[in-house]
């Protein structure tokens, strides 16, 4: 069992050193839509640091952090999603948290695109699709 854990840790470290074949998405992103539902009121935010293969943020209820690992040249997954354990305030917060965690634990890909008249990124997994808008002062508003 110890050998398996050691081997898994080694491969995780090795994979995190591989450069991502993803768009450069460093920075804070506000989750606006999940599976077609407007979730802006949940105020969930993801902060990508692709140089360090790290993801941090807020899922609507709790702080989260994870290491980003290449699954394939286009897909990423987070084998170690960490979260604080505070209760969610409303149903939209709970709904957002559940789907965000499911998406991050599955393999997913990221692409830049314009949706709903807004420039942003889409995170797509097997079961969910999230649309996020870049946060900041120099971001185009539509």
Image (cartoon, rainbow, N blue to C red):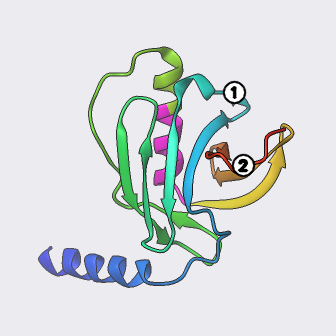
The percent coordinates of residue 103 (x first, y second) are 54, 48
**First-in-chain label (1 vs 2):** 1
Q: Secondary structure at mark 2?
A: loop
Stretch of the chain drawn in magenta: 97-107
User: In the rendered view, would you say 15 is above or below 120?
Assistant: below
Q: CA distance from mark 1 to mark 2?
A: 23 Å
Horizontal side, residue 109 vs residue 111: left or right: left
Residue 116 inside the magenta-drawn segment: no
The percent coordinates of residue 109 (x first, y second) are 64, 61
Query: Quick check: marks 1 and 2 in contact, CB under 8 Å?
Result: no
What residue is pinned by disc 2? 139
What residue is pinned by disc 1? 37
Relative depth, front residue between 126 and 52: 52
Horizontal side, residue 141 vs residue 71: left or right: right
Residue 105 inside the magenta-drawn segment: yes
Give me the residue at 37% from left, 85% from top: 14
**Mark 2, other Cα within 10 Å: few <14 / some 14–19 / many ≥20:** few
- Name the front one of labels 1 and 2: 2
**Mark 1, other Cα within 10 Å: few <14 / some 14–19 / many ≥20:** few
User: In the rendered view, would you say 57 is above or below 85?
Assistant: below
């Amino acid at each position: 069992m110890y050998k398996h854990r050691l081997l898994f840790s080694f491969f995780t470290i090795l994979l995190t050193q591989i450069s991502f074949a993803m768009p450069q998405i460093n920075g804070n992103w506000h989750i606006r839509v999940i599976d077609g539902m407007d979730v802006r009121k949940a105020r969930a935010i993801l902060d990508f640091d692709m140089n360090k293969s790290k993801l941090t943020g807020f899922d609507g209820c709790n702080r989260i952090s994870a290491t980003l690992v290449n699954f394939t040249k286009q897909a990423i997954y987070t084998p170690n999603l960490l979260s604080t354990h505070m209760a969610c305030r409303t149903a939209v917060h709970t709904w957002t948290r559940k789907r965000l965690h499911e998406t991050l634990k599955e393999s997913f890909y990221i692409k830049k695109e314009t949706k709903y008249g807004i420039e942003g990124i889409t995170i797509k997994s097997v079961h969910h699709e999230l649309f996020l808008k870049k946060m900041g002062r120099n971001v185009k508003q539509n």
